[in-house]
Amino acid sequence: MDKSLISKLIEMAKKAQKNSYSPYSRYPVGASVVGESGKIYTGTNIENASFGLSICAERVAIFKAISSGERKIKDVCVVAKSATPCGACRQVIIEFADKDANVICVDYHPLEKNKEKITIIPIKKLLFKPFDPSKAGL
């Protein structure tokens, strides 16, 4: 992976993290994705008092990309105090990600700026035996 692209994705995910609406969990998350076109889309977690109506940052970023005309995601970046996509996000990532995509997980908290841990996970290691729409006849 291109180090300058990784840096850009992290920078944009951190910026998105600042827009988090997380009054209940107080757990701000930011995400960024690269579409097939090369354009970068961002998202942040948005909570709701009816917790089931909340949405994760990764899905916001992916859905923005798809609703803007992208059909494949090249890479995904998620930034949080302990960053890793949830199971629902992993399935959505797999649905839209290129087979060679990576998920860049950045453990980061705005108040602990010098403590940042970056882990890069290849998409094929993200989820064991994911639901495959083509195998389900969809």
Image (cartoon, grey):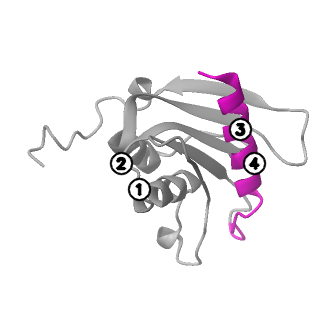
Q: Residue furthest bottom?
A: 49
Amino acid tagged 2: Arg
As measured in the structure, the alpha-carbon distance from the residue carrying label 1 to the one carrying label 3 is 20 Å
Residue 12 is a magenta residue:
yes
Query: Magenta residues, as a range?
Result: 1-24
Residues at marks 1 and 2 touching, judged by CB atoms closer than 8 Å: yes
| Of pointers 2 and 3, the one earlier in the residue sequence | 3
Specify the quadrant of the image occupied by residue 127: top left
- Main SS, magenta region, reads helix
**Secondary-structure class at tag 3:** helix
Specify the quadrant of the image occupied by residue 8: top right
Q: Is residue 96 above or below residue 45?
A: above
Which residue is the site of mark 1?
66
Query: Could you tell me which residue is drawn at 19 percent across and 44 percent down?
Result: 133
Mark 3 is surrounded, within 10 Å at the Cα level, by few (under 14), some (14 to 19) or many (20 or more) other residues, namely: some
Is residue 19 found left or right of 86 in the rendered image? right
- Which quadrant of the figure contains the N terminus? top right
As measured in the structure, the alpha-carbon distance from the residue carrying label 1 to the one carrying label 2 is 6 Å
| Of pointers 1 and 3, the one earlier in the residue sequence | 3
Q: Which mark is residue 71?
A: 2
